[in-house]
Amino acid sequence: MRKILVVNPKGGSGKSTLSTHLASWFAWQEARVMLGDLDKQHSSHHWLDLRPETLPRIERWDIGADQIARPPKGCQVAILDTPACFGSAKLKKVLKIVDHVVVPLLPSAFDLWAIADFFDELAEMKAVRRDEVQVGAVGMRINSRTQSAQQLPEFLHKFDIPLITTIRDTQLYNQTIQRGMTLFDLPHSKTQRDREEWQPLIDWIMKR
């Protein structure tokens, strides 16, 4: 079973976009996928409620904000979306039941300043120190030609965290998410460039 935590203490970083797209990709591989959502706004679960029945099924993982439980038996992929200001106590609990941590990042100075303390805190967690959990970052809404995007790998190098891939900003994300869909639910001909951006993240998760 693959258990993936999507986390960033700052709101609006793209956590739900990452969570729902990963869930959709694995569902298309005929895996039994469960999507959990600890955010009070339940953005990922609202998206799940809108998902057309004709698309590959993604199940709801009611993890419980206080009694954080392991995914049910039979689940092959479990993905957990988290809120902003995700506290240390809950982070410690969740790290005991996941094997991958994906941190979505925006390339602005404000976002990088906000994430620095979190990376320091994450590095001190026992599961990360023992290499029981793999941690990687994904640049969100990236224009590769901007100076801020080019500085992102250098920033992450300070924390020994790899930049797995970068995801460009396109209206296709808004257009599909509001219908309970993702880019992976669209024809390859319309999304080939974007699928290529997601592939390094999928390869990284599949590697272990």
Image (spheres, helix red, strand yellow):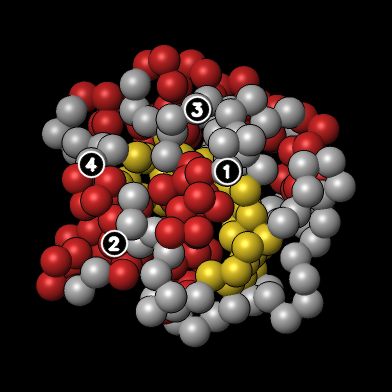
Give amino acid for label 1: His
* Residue 84 position (above or below residue 45): above
| Residue at the farthest right position | 67
Q: Check residue 169 in the rendering and tell me which mark sits there, or answer none.
A: 4
Tag 3 secondary structure: loop
What is the crowding at mark 4: few (fewer than 14 residues within 10 Å), some, or many (at least 20)? few
Q: Earlier in the sequence, mark 3 or mark 4?
A: 3
Examine the rendering and report whether any part of residue 204 can be seen: no
- Residue that badge 1 annotates: 42
Tag 2 secondary structure: helix
Q: Check residue 11 in the rendering and tell me which mark sits there, or answer none.
A: 3
Estimate the x, y position of residue 17 in percent, counting from the top left.
41, 48
* Residue 92 position (above or below residue 197): above
Q: Earlier in the sequence, mark 1 or mark 4?
A: 1
What is the crowding at mark 1: few (fewer than 14 residues within 10 Å), some, or many (at least 20)? some
Gap between marks 3 and 1, in whole Å? 13 Å
CB atoms at circles 1 and 2 under 8 Å apart? no
